[in-house]
Image (tube, rainbow, N blue to C red):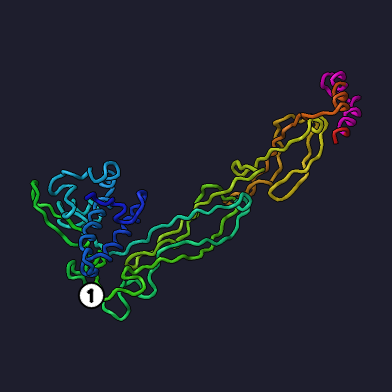
């Protein structure tokens, strides 16, 4: 019978983080431990979960598994990577080597020490103007929190918590194996208490003995003026709950800014393109231009060439550090008409005869007539 995919065993995706894999393992280990779960197949499933975590919980083994699947661990020999019965459930390979040379896992590191909760990431999409001026909004974030019913101790209130007899409250159990190279000692998480050091007679009726619950919370987020696409806001203490009294993680809000139809951003400056007729370009004019603050007047100098950039001071993006606003850069696009009536064509022919495109002072009245004809 084909072995089940280890990712499916733990119920995680193939791109799951180390923390997600560890959380999934701990949850399943609590549910399937033979001392807690009396279903006929619980023990076998418990062994399969430990086997899966022994591979996916280690970066090198996980890489091998991702490349070759179960075949990567076949015929490895007793005591090697294929012998999961001896090594399943350890926290990392550093514990094993520390036992070999120093007789204890990393200076007596305790599995039930307080641990910080995982950071969460949330993507928030906002409009261009919201990024320019900032806003305060609310987001809904699913996260783990300490169970309010048992206050995180995992036992039903009123029932006792006792020291785990297997690990004597340390959360770790030491194993010794004989290998061709000699005696090999390893320390791994206690499977009976899942590294907590305490066991309970009756699991909490709300969290099922995990000590944490999944909740969706509404969180206010203040987006500062001038934030750019791809920047990340860190909200301290808004991530997953800590373990064994550890602090909660942080919430990372990644900002995505929707493109604007008219404006583009270049640093603190806003860039736009404005079309004008070649009469306006030749004679000059005053036009209305949209800005982030609304419409303003912009003077087009006489003889403006296509591609020229005109600057509107302090109409750009607010600096995040409070150093004022950038400018709006207006790139001029001179539009050549594609449909002319007979009168317009005749006027242009006269214009060509008058100096091949030059604009002498004495001809200015004529060009005013051309301008009027196009309005």
Q: Nearer the viewer, residue 140 or 356?
A: 140
179 with respect to 37 (left or right) = left
Majority secondary structure in the magenta region: helix
Residue most toward the front? 1
Q: Residue at x 25, y 76 (%)?
A: 201
Q: Which residues are magenta?
A: 350-371
Count of number-bearing discs: 1
Percent position of residue 139, x then y: 52, 61
Percent position of residue 284, x then y: 81, 34
Asked if residue 16 is positioned above or below residue 221 in the image, the reply reads above
Q: Residue at x 56, y 56 (%)?
A: 223
For mark 1, give the secondary structure: strand
Using the rendered image of the protein, determine whether residue 273 is visible from the camera's viewpoint.
yes
Q: Nearer the viewer, residue 279 or 266?
A: 279
Q: Residue at x 16, y 50 (%)?
A: 83
Q: Residue at x 72, y 33 (%)?
A: 333
Question: Label 1 belongs to which residue?
Answer: 162
191 with respect to 269 (left or right) = left
Residue 122 magenta-drawn?
A: no
Asked if residue 350 is positioned above or below residue 373 in the image, the reply reads above
Q: Dividing the picture into quarters, in which one does residue 356 lie?
A: top right
Using the rendered image of the protein, determine whether residue 170 is visible from the camera's viewpoint.
no
Q: Nearer the viewer, residue 24 or 218?
A: 24
205 with respect to 263 (left or right) = left
Asked if residue 355 is positioned above or below residue 89 in the image, the reply reads above
Percent position of residue 314, x then y: 68, 46
State which quarter of the image contains the C terminus: top right
Q: Dividing the picture into quarters, in which one does residue 359 lie?
A: top right
Asked if residue 332 is positioned above or below residue 133 in the image, the reply reads above
Percent position of residue 310, x then y: 72, 37
Residue 356 magenta-drawn?
A: yes
């Amino acid at each position: 019978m084909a072995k089940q995919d280890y990712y499916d065993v733990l119920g995680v995706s193939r791109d799951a983080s180390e923390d997600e894999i560890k959380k999934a393992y701990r949850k399943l280990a609590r549910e399937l431990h033979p001392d807690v779960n009396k279903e006929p197949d619980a023990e076998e499933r418990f062994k399969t979960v430990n086997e899966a975590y022994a591979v996916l919980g280690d970066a090198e083994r996980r890489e091998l598994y991702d490349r070759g699947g179960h075949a990567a661990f076949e015929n490895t020999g007793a005591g090697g990577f294929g012998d999961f019965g001896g090594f399943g459930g350890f926290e990392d390979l550093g514990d094993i080597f520390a036992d070999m040379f120093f007789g204890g896992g990393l200076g007596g590191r305790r599995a039930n020490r307080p641990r910080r909760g995982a950071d969460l990431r949330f993507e928030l999409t906002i409009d261009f103007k919201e990024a320019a001026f900032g806003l305060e909004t609310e987001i809904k974030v699913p996260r783990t929190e300490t169970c309010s019913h048992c206050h995180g101790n995992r036992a039903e209130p009123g029932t006792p918590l006792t020291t785990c007899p297997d690990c004597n409250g340390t959360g770790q159990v030491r194993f010794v194996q004989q290998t061709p190279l000699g005696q090999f000692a390893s320390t791994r998480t206690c499977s009976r208490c899942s590294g907590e050091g305490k066991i309970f007679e009756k699991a909490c009726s709300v969290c099922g003995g995990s000590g944490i619950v999944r909740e969706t919370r509404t969180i206010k987020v203040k987006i500062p003026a001038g934030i750019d696409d791809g920047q990340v806001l860190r909200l301290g203490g808004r991530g997953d709950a800590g373990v064994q009294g550890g602090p909660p993680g942080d919430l990372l809000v990644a900002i995505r800014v929707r493109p604007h139809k008219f404006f583009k951003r270049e640093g603190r400056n806003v860039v736009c393109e404005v079309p004008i007729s070649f009469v306006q370009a030749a004679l000059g004019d005053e036009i209305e231009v949209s800005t982030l603050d609304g419409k303003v007047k912009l003077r087009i100098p006489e003889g403006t060439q296509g591609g020229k950039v005109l600057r509107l001071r302090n109409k750009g993006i607010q600096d995040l550090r409070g150093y004022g606003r950038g400018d709006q850069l207006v790139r001029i696009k001179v539009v050549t008409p594609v449909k002319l009536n007979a009168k317009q064509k005749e006027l242009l022919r006269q214009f060509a005869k008058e100096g091949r495109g030059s604009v002498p002072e004495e001809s200015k009245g004529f060009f005013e007539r051309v301008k009027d004809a196009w309005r």
